[in-house]
Amino acid sequence: MPDKTARRLNPKKLLLSKWTAATPQNKEKHFLVTQLITPDTPDAPIEHIEMEAIYSRRSVILPWQDLTDTGQWLQGWQ
Protein backbone atom coordinates (compact mmCIF):
# COMPACT_ATOMS: atom_id res chain seq x y z
CA MET A 1 0.00 0.00 0.00
CA PRO A 2 1.65 3.29 -1.07
CA ASP A 3 2.22 5.88 1.63
CA LYS A 4 1.36 9.59 1.52
CA THR A 5 4.61 10.48 -0.24
CA ALA A 6 3.90 8.20 -3.21
CA ARG A 7 5.36 9.11 -6.58
CA ARG A 8 3.82 8.72 -10.01
CA LEU A 9 5.52 6.32 -12.41
CA ASN A 10 4.95 5.15 -15.96
CA PRO A 11 5.46 1.36 -15.98
CA LYS A 12 6.55 1.41 -19.65
CA LYS A 13 9.53 3.61 -18.74
CA LEU A 14 10.82 1.51 -15.82
CA LEU A 15 13.06 -0.83 -17.82
CA LEU A 16 16.72 -0.50 -16.70
CA SER A 17 15.81 2.03 -14.01
CA LYS A 18 17.83 1.96 -10.78
CA TRP A 19 16.33 1.60 -7.30
CA THR A 20 17.56 1.50 -3.71
CA ALA A 21 15.82 -0.62 -1.09
CA ALA A 22 14.72 1.58 1.82
CA THR A 23 15.47 -1.28 4.23
CA PRO A 24 18.14 -3.49 2.62
CA GLN A 25 18.23 -7.18 3.49
CA ASN A 26 21.12 -9.64 2.93
CA LYS A 27 23.34 -6.79 1.66
CA GLU A 28 20.90 -6.30 -1.24
CA LYS A 29 20.56 -2.54 -1.43
CA HIS A 30 20.77 -1.60 -5.12
CA PHE A 31 18.43 -3.04 -7.73
CA LEU A 32 17.93 -2.72 -11.48
CA VAL A 33 14.63 -3.29 -13.32
CA THR A 34 15.62 -6.00 -15.82
CA GLN A 35 12.25 -6.88 -17.34
CA LEU A 36 8.69 -5.65 -17.73
CA ILE A 37 6.36 -8.62 -17.39
CA THR A 38 3.90 -8.21 -20.24
CA PRO A 39 0.35 -9.54 -19.79
CA ASP A 40 -1.11 -12.25 -22.03
CA THR A 41 -3.43 -9.80 -23.76
CA PRO A 42 -1.65 -6.97 -25.62
CA ASP A 43 -4.15 -4.30 -24.50
CA ALA A 44 -3.84 -5.13 -20.78
CA PRO A 45 -1.64 -2.86 -18.66
CA ILE A 46 1.73 -3.95 -17.31
CA GLU A 47 1.28 -5.18 -13.74
CA HIS A 48 4.63 -6.75 -12.75
CA ILE A 49 8.33 -6.12 -13.18
CA GLU A 50 11.45 -8.17 -12.58
CA MET A 51 14.21 -6.58 -10.52
CA GLU A 52 17.73 -7.87 -10.02
CA ALA A 53 19.86 -7.21 -6.94
CA ILE A 54 23.24 -5.87 -8.03
CA TYR A 55 25.12 -7.49 -5.12
CA SER A 56 23.77 -11.04 -5.39
CA ARG A 57 22.21 -11.14 -8.90
CA ARG A 58 19.04 -12.51 -7.28
CA SER A 59 15.89 -11.68 -9.23
CA VAL A 60 12.50 -10.88 -7.78
CA ILE A 61 9.15 -10.27 -9.49
CA LEU A 62 6.86 -7.71 -7.91
CA PRO A 63 3.98 -5.39 -8.82
CA TRP A 64 5.46 -2.22 -10.33
CA GLN A 65 3.18 -0.15 -8.07
CA ASP A 66 5.37 -1.20 -5.11
CA LEU A 67 8.00 1.23 -6.44
CA THR A 68 5.69 4.16 -5.68
CA ASP A 69 6.02 3.46 -1.93
CA THR A 70 8.95 5.54 -0.65
CA GLY A 71 8.92 3.46 2.52
CA GLN A 72 10.11 0.48 0.44
CA TRP A 73 11.96 1.95 -2.56
CA LEU A 74 14.02 5.04 -3.33
CA GLN A 75 14.51 6.06 -6.94
CA GLY A 76 18.12 5.86 -8.12
CA TRP A 77 21.12 4.39 -6.29
CA GLN A 78 21.69 6.11 -2.98
Image (cartoon, helix red, strand yellow):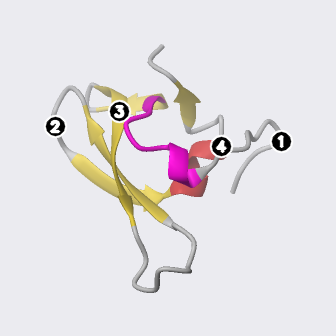
Q: Earlier in the sequence, mark 1 or mark 2?
A: 1
Which residue does the numbered mark 2 point to in the structure image? 57
Q: Against 11, is 25 above or below?
A: above
Which residue does the numbered mark 4 point to in the structure image? 69
Gap in angstroms between the C-alphas marked 4 and 1: 8 Å
Gap in angstroms between the C-alphas marked 4 and 2: 23 Å
Gap in angstroms between the C-alphas marked 3 and 1: 23 Å
13 or 76: nearer the viewer:
13
Label 4 secondary element: loop
Which residue does the numbered mark 3 point to in the structure image? 31
Residue pictured at 41% horizontal, 43% vertical: 15
Q: Earlier in the sequence, mark 3 or mark 1?
A: 1
Type of the residue with mark 2: Arg
Type of the residue with mark 3: Phe
Frontmost of labels 1 and 2 is 2
Residue pictured at 65% horizontal, 35% vertical: 70
Residue pictured at 27% horizontal, 25% vertical: 27
Which residue does the numbered mark 1 point to in the structure image? 4
Q: Which residues are magenta?
A: 11-20
Q: Earlier in the sequence, mark 4 or mark 1?
A: 1
